[in-house]
Image: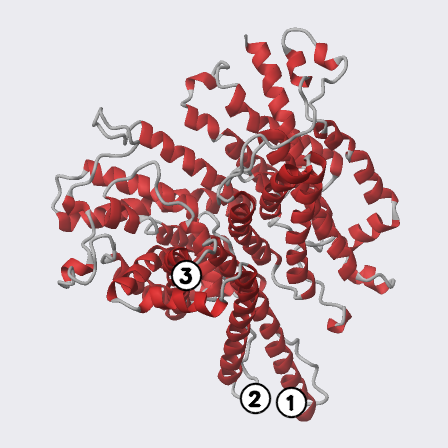
């Protein structure tokens, strides 16, 4: 973001510029992605309009459809937030993937070993143990980053690989179910009190929402977390400093901010958020950790964060959108002779066009601002040295 | 028979070396031109699926070429984003990797009728036994038997790469675009075409490495077979200080680290560890190498920064 302090009022107020820019970028990107998607769908001899309509219908027509979309969105919100917090500090946490996998392992360990506790203590403890596991996993790349300068993209990717092996080992050894006759490689099934309650049972909606939909209290928790992250970033000193090192580490350091300590904090917060990613599938759906646990949610968080412009509320919307595309795959699979992977491509094109569109708009807005500032500088104080235009 | 196993381990290490080295050379061209390429993994992934399809349809040579073209296509997206639109290079690279996973599923579904793998037994080149070396005693000869002809090609490619970078006008300009684009531009050389070329070569080489992996090593395509080797190649590049010959040493180290879990699991010390921990070795080696070497090496001075000069009219 450019510094606007002291700049006289331009022709349009900055927030109007901002809003126009956002709308233009998002609208343009969606239009572009929609058109390219339409070309691909057309190539399969299917009507694009019909496909887009079915995606909408499958995501919205009944309460259970909406519940499915929200279920899909729950882990994506957490992973999107995790990526975004690190990104705000100028870092890439590609390791959310490994962090949530390790978190599932530590959470599962808590679930099976602390099952003597009552539910109101057990569930929070499981979540805390999960978060602790993820934070520990994020600590290694974070400390390497600040101490040695090892780039977090490479180290977190390696940590992801290590996490997969670690969990495979844990499932074979300490966490393996004591049930000898079991072919499936998994932990013991958790006690019912260790599971997060479903919204449908809490609100008496079991009639409308079938038991196969795992919309739990983790979804409202995800929304609350969005607000908390927003407060952290926008309303606290820590958040201000995080954003400062993310946008300009040089001037932040000159302003007396210790970069490595902050990078550390931001990365650990990111890891903590990542710890909750796998919880809905473990505590809301299966009730155990098996070798075929869901993977890829951490990478999906990157997509969510970029689509949501790394803003907590944008992330919630982006997660809903991806949740809907996920649900739409069911519809596409049933209704058309079209590979469901087409929607993954659509997602990819969308994220690419969003990234490029925002860059174009950002530059256009910067150019406009510089022009305005330059015009006013020459008008007001032609002899004064031109201050460096912040970019 | 530990020595016999050692021979086989070397053979496997050389295959992984080939993948890491080719991809790392790709990263070298891109980063020496001034564009950081985190997307190598994604370009390699596209190379595996395109290469597997190409080899199934038209034979191994065409497969390698088509794989390289796939990587090239993916890299052009990166080039358009970072050179023309000046999107942050890491952001673009990360997006490329995310998109590549989806694209590979889509392509596999289209080519093979299933999203995660191809039919096995993709046609591959005739394996060769390296003369003299393959008759080494005590099982060591096994290291040089049944070798894919691409492995020696990977070693030999060092010579033309070194020559192009050090002795040609193109190489000099490419390197100067990555070190000091303003000075380069001031003598009338345009930056954008050089960076397009650098990124394009990187994509083609990463795609070639991916195709080699699918066609020559695994003889089938399956999802996730690159195992993060694009990132390991980046680590080798750092270790190799962005120079081809030292990169080769780095790639050898990482290639053998990859082979340990597969072949040396019976060796002393290693055999005491659970199998899953042995599988972590290549990743741990990479992390240690990166943490130990970064800061002592000199990346291209302008790599990672968009070239803003020329008043926007590149």
Residue B212 in the image: above or below residue A118: above
**Would you say the residues marked 1 and 2 are in contact, meaning their CB atoms lie under 8 Å apart?**
yes
Whole-Å distance between the Cαs marked 1 and 2?
8 Å
Left or right, residue A290 beside residue A391: left
Residue A158 in the image: above or below residue B13: below
Closer to us: A226 or B198 = B198
Residue B104 pos. (x, y %): 54, 48
Residue A309 pos. (x, y %): 48, 66
The mark that comes first in sequence, 3 or 2, is 2
The mark that comes first in sequence, 1 or 3, is 3
Whole-Å distance between the Cαs marked 1 and 3?
48 Å
> Which residue shows up at 38% across the image and 63% down it?
A324
> Which residue shows up at 51% across the image and 24% down it?
B261
* Residue at the spot of label 3: A325
Label 3: chain? Answer: A
Around disc 1, counting alpha carbons within 10 Å, would you say few (fewer than 14), some (14 to 19), or many (20 or more)? Answer: some
Whole-Å distance between the Cαs marked 3 and 2?
44 Å
Residue B28 pos. (x, y %): 71, 44
- Same subunit: marks 3 and 2: yes
Label 2: chain? Answer: A
């Amino acid at each position: 973001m450019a510094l606007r302090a002291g700049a006289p009022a331009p022709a349009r107020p900055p927030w109007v510029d901002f809003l126009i820019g956002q709308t233009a970028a998002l609208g343009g990107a969606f239009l572009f992605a929609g058109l390219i998607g339409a070309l691909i769908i057309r190539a399969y001899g299917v009507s694009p309009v019909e496909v887009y309509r079915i995606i909408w219908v499958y995501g919205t027509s009944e309460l259970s459809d909406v519940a499915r979309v929200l279920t899909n969105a729950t882990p994506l919100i957490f992973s999107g937030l995790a990526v975004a917090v690190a990104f705000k500090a100028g870092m890439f946490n590609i390791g959310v993937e490994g962090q949530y996998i390790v978190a599932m392992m530590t959470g599962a360990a808590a679930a099976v070993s602390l099952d003597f506790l009552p539910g109101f203590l057990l569930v929070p403890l499981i979540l805390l143990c999960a978060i602790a596991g993820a934070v520990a996993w994020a600590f290694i790349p974070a400390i390497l980053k600040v101490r040695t300068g090892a780039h977090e993209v490479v180290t977190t990717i390696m940590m992801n690989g290590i996490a997969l092996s670690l969990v495979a080992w844990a499932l074979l050894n300490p966490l393996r179910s004591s049930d000898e006759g079991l072919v499936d490689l998994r932990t013991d099934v958790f006690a019912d009190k260790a599971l997060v309650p479903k919204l449908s049972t809490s609100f008496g909606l079991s009639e409308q929402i079938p038991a196969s939909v795992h919309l739990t209290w983790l979804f409202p928790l995800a929304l609350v977390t969005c607000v908390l992250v927003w407060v952290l970033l926008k309303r606290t000193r820590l958040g201000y400093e995080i954003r400062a090192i993310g946008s300009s580490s040089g001037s932040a350091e000159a302003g007396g901010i210790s970069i490595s300590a902050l990078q550390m904090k931001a990365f650990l917060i990111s890891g903590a958020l990542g710890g909750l990613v796998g919880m809905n599938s473990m505590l809301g759906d299966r009730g155990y950790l098996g070798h075929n646990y869901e993977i890829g949610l951490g990478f999906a968080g990157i997509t969510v964060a970029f689509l949501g412009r790394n803003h907590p509320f944008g992330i919630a919307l982006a997660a809903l959108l991806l949740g809907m595309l996920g649900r739409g795959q069911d519809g596409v699979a049933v209704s058309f002779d079209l590979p469901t992977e087409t929607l993954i491509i659509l997602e990819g094109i969308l994220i690419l066009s969003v990234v490029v569109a925002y860059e174009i708009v950002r530059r256009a807005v910067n150019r406009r601002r510089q022009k305005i500032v330059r015009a006013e500088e020459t008008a007001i104080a032609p002899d004064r040295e031109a201050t460096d235009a912040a970019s | 028979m530990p020595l016999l196993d050692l021979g086989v381990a070397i053979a496997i290490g050389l295959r992984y070396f080939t993948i890491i080295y080719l991809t790392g050379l790709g990263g070298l061209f891109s980063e020496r031109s001034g564009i950081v390429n985190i997307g190598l993994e994604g370009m390699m992934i596209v190379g595996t699926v395109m290469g597997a399809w190409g080899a199934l349809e038209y034979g191994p040579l065409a497969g390698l070429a088509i794989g390289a073209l796939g990587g090239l296509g993916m890299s052009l997206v990166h080039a358009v984003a970072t050179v023309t639109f000046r999107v942050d290079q890491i952001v673009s690279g990360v997006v490329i990797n995310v998109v590549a996973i989806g694209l590979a599923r889509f392509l596999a579904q289209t080519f093979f009728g299933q999203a995660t793998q191809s039919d096995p037994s993709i046609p591959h080149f005739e394996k060769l036994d390296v003369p003299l070396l393959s008759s080494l005693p005590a099982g060591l000869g096994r290291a040089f038997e049944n070798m894919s002809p691409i492995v020696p090609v990977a070693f030999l490619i060092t010579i033309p790469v070194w020559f192009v970078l050090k002795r040609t006008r193109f190489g000099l300009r490419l390197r100067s675009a990555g070190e000091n684009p303003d000075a380069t531009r001031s003598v009338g050389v345009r930056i954008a075409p050089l960076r397009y070329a650098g990124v394009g070569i990187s994509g083609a080489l990463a795609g070639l490495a991916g195709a080699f992996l699918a066609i020559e090593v695994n003889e089938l395509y399956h999802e996730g077979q690159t195992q993060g080797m694009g990132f390991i190649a980046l680590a080798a590049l750092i270790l190799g200080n962005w120079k081809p010959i030292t990169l080769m040493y780095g790639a050898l180290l990482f290639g053998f680290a990859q082979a340990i879990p597969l072949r040396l699991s019976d060796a002393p010390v290693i055999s005491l560890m659970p199998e899953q921990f042995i599988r972590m070795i290549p990743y741990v080696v990479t992390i240690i190498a990166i943490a130990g070497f970064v800061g002592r090496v000199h990346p291209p001075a302008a790599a990672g920064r968009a070239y803003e000069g020329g008043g926007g009219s590149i």
